Image (cartoon, helix red, strand yellow):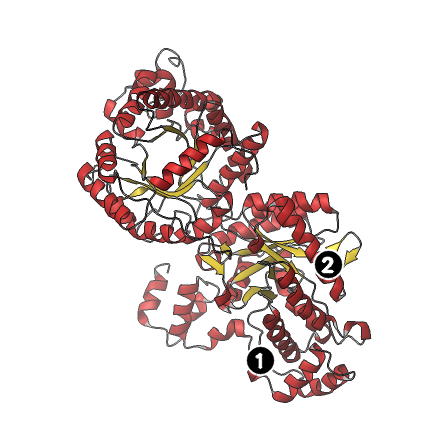
Amino acid sequence: MYTQPYKDPARVEQLERLLAENILILDGAMGTMIQALEFSEDAFRADRFTQHPLPLRGNNDLLTLTQPEQIAAIHSAFLDAGADLIETNTFNSTGISQADYGLQSLVPELNFAAARMARDQADLFTARTPEKPRFVVGSIGPTNRTASLSPDVNRPDFRNVSFEELRQTYAEAAGALIEGGCDILMVETIFDTLNCKAALIAIDDVFDSAGYRVPVMISGTITDASGRTLSGQTVAAFWNSVRHAKPLCIGLNCALGATELRPWLMELSRIAECPVSIHPNAGLPNELGEYDDSPEHMASVLKAFANDGLINLAGGCCGTTPEHIRAIAETLAGQTPRIPADAIPYCRLAGLEPLTLSPELNFVNVGERTNVTGSARFRRLIQAGDFEAAVDVARQQIENGAQIIDINMDEGLLDGEAAMTRFLKLIAAEPDIARVPVMLDSSRWDVLLAGLACLQGKGIVNSISLKEGEAVFVAQARSVLRFGAAVIVMAFDENGQADSLEQRVDFCVRAWQLLTEVVGFPPEDIIFDPNIFAIATGIEAHNNYALDFIEATRRIKQSCPGALISGGVSNVSFSFRGQDQIRKAIHSVFLFHAIHAGMDMGIVNAGQLEIYDEIAPDLREAVEDVVLNRREDATDRLLEIAHAFQGSGKETRTDEQAWRQEPVDARLKHALIKGINSFITEDVEEPGCSRQRRWMSSRGR
């Protein structure tokens, strides 16, 4: 992601070498040490802020300016205890956090002064023992806002902070930290990965302005025994969402004690291709909100982590003192650091849960019904403003097997940007939907950017192409990469859409070279769409469209190693619209051959696919003749046999509503698990509904 040269390459090389040779030690909790000093309101104000209209006690970052000797002494105590890296006193030094105290204007000064103070202390200790260099980590906290969740349970699409507001506040802080002399920037205590993405993009902006960069560390926080962040992501989904930043180190801190963090640390250590850090709390807080884990016990737990090859860097968060850090440093001295995981080039996507596109998946279904251009029902719901029912469409796609959902709001009468962002914010509040990755589908770049600013996970942008030339293509690809998304590239150039086998291959190879050689896009995150067009239209030139796509898939995979292939599957059967059974058969036969050629995913109604071997033999043969263009009269023969299947399957309710045929208690259970409230009233009032569920209903469910 970061293309600028390092500010001090030799120092970065030294740091990377030390991480490979030893388990380095991070400092402990600045807040714990400050609380022990029991500063009064007057101490927080000092002479400078005596007339400030708001209370300032508790604004620990302000003490860098009003009690500098005490903050410097805390840094010194942690360094003396054995810390290799110390964090700046800037956890809340962002405009959003300082707004609580009316001190937003101090953000540049707070960050610069804190960085200079830590730098001076680190350099002092390095000068005493040059064989043990010390490093300064610029701490960038999460703010007190979350971009992925609403603070109002009655308004799930409401946010009290925007992505752009976060980006601006993080950029202001990061710029001052670098100017003050930090060796590293750490985005820490991440409870919402969308906040983290805003910070990472802000940091990239600062690097661009400065013309150089420093290493970046990322540290998330697991909030409870579920193993998820506050915004719902698993550890693996979190890693998939931020790995594009190529951090110096990825880790976990805060919320839990060392013992409680073990399972999630094991998961992170298993998958991370960079060093892993851990700085837990000193146990779980007691009834007084204090932390009781002793230095000796905490050090012994971290030693067990080291023995199991789980960590490269260790320190402490809430409740940890210089005594904790001294015990950890002494216990981990001489321990062998973890070896990073192998970088296997798979496309790693994420919603709240990870989706790795490994060969074992064979084929990935992308649900197409949340698309106003592909679903008349979804379009009507969005146009009518019935977003709650539109969310149910997404839920149904996932219930029917979609592993990714494609969302498109490109309709002439819609405000596409507003509709896209509202819908994405609504589904973010639905765990059964938000668990899968999102494919943002639009022909408008502003809509795609707005969608990216709503995704905490790693999604797919659908699509960019060369139709506006190489400069625009490269700029858009770089933006997608900054957000960490994968990208679909349409086989389209300045002269139009590829419709021959040769054009499909040539357009994709050209785009591949630009993406990998100019942009630096990971090959495994490039997905080509070589254009699926309708067959059996009565126009002879169209008869080879499916076969050309299949052969183009094979050639593109050979010429562009690591790239994936996708396409809008329903396009291939468009000439048979209204004949669902025939369309299902065409989709299944087409996919059978395309997947064998290397097609990895397809945008398709997951509930409307036949199993290839279960298609009626005479229908399958006729469809295969059309798809593979095996006979001149293939279309005519399929039209003849289609009459026998006309209306087949329409007598029963759709697969999406099949659960409504179950007994009432089974329906209630399904609705409870899936979060469907559309039928609750009629179901609980139906004869046969259990007395217990009636009782629950009478009390508001």
Q: Which one is earlier in the sequence, the residue at label 2 or at label 1?
A: 2
* Residue 675: image location, x then y, percent: 44, 61
Q: Which residue is mark 1?
A: 612
Quadrant of the snapshot with the C terminus: bottom left
262, above or below 641, in the image: above
Confirm or deny contact between disc 2 and disc 1 (CB under 8 A).
no
Q: Which residue is mark 2?
A: 506
Given the image, on which type of amino acid does mark 1 rest? Tyr
Q: Residue at x 32, y 65 (%)?
A: 695
Give neighbour class at mark 1: few <14, some 14-19, many 20+ (Cα, 10 Å).
some
Q: Residue at x 57, y 80 (%)?
A: 612
Q: Nearer the viewer, residue 500 or 661?
A: 500
* Residue 678: image location, x then y, percent: 48, 64
Q: Is residue 332 left or right of residue 620?
A: left
Measured Cα–Cα span from mark 2 to mark 1: 31 Å
Picture quarter containing residue 42? Answer: top left
* Residue 134: image location, x then y, percent: 35, 28
Eye-nearest disc, 2 or 1: 2
- Judged from the image, the secondary structure of the residue bearing numbered disc 2 is helix
Q: Is residue 42 left or right of residue 486?
A: left
Given the image, on which type of amino acid does mark 2 rest? Asp
114, above or below 575, in the image: above
Q: Residue at x 32, y 34 (%)?
A: 26
* Residue 422: image location, x then y, percent: 56, 49
Whether residue 289 is visible: no
Q: Is residue 211 left or right of residue 640?
A: left
Quadrant of the snapshot with the N terminus: top right
Q: Nearer the viewer, residue 551 or 657?
A: 551
Give neighbour class at mark 2: few <14, some 14-19, many 20+ (Cα, 10 Å).
some
